[in-house]
Amino acid sequence: SFSMNYLPQVFKQGAKKFTVLVFSVNNVLNSKQVFGYRYAQNGLRREAIVPASRMFFFVGAFFSFGVDRSQEAIDKTLTIRI
């Protein structure tokens, strides 16, 4: 497998918003993968269990939007311990 991720700076710095661009390829060498065999009841025939596709590509983008509440969580933790 091969995977590449890129984190572009889309939003202004300091905000808790980010974007991740992803590109991934499974079975880069395009080899025939056999996960096991399925046998007939009498044991004379067998069929290889293989993935649905030999090579798989994934291109995607993940977005996160949020408010920075880390200081609020720190304050809450400190007030409980006092």
Image (cartoon, helix red, strand yellow):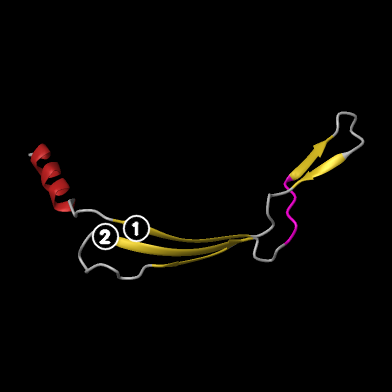
Q: Position of residue 74 (x, y in %)?
A: 15, 48
Q: Which residue is mark 2?
A: 17
Name the amino acid type tagged 2: Lys
The reply to whether dot 1 and dot 2 touch (C-beta < 8 Å) is yes
Q: Position of residue 63 (x, y in %)?
A: 34, 58
Q: Residue at left 46%, top 60%?
A: 60
- In the displayed structure image, the side of residue 10 where residue 35 appears, left or right: right
Q: Is residue 3 above or below residue 72?
A: below
Q: Residue at left 22%, top 68%?
A: 13
Within the magenta stretch, is there residue 50? no
Q: Badge 1: how crowded within 10 Å, few (<14), some, or many (20+)?
A: few
Q: Residue at left 89%, top 38%?
A: 45
Q: Which residues are magenta?
A: 31-35
Q: CA distance from mark 1 to mark 2?
A: 8 Å
Name the amino acid type tagged 1: Phe
Q: Secondary structure at mark 1?
A: strand
Quadrant of the image occupied by residue 43: top right
Q: Is residue 50 above or below residue 61?
A: above
Q: Which residue is mark 1?
A: 63
| Residue in front for this viewpoint, 82 or 60 | 60
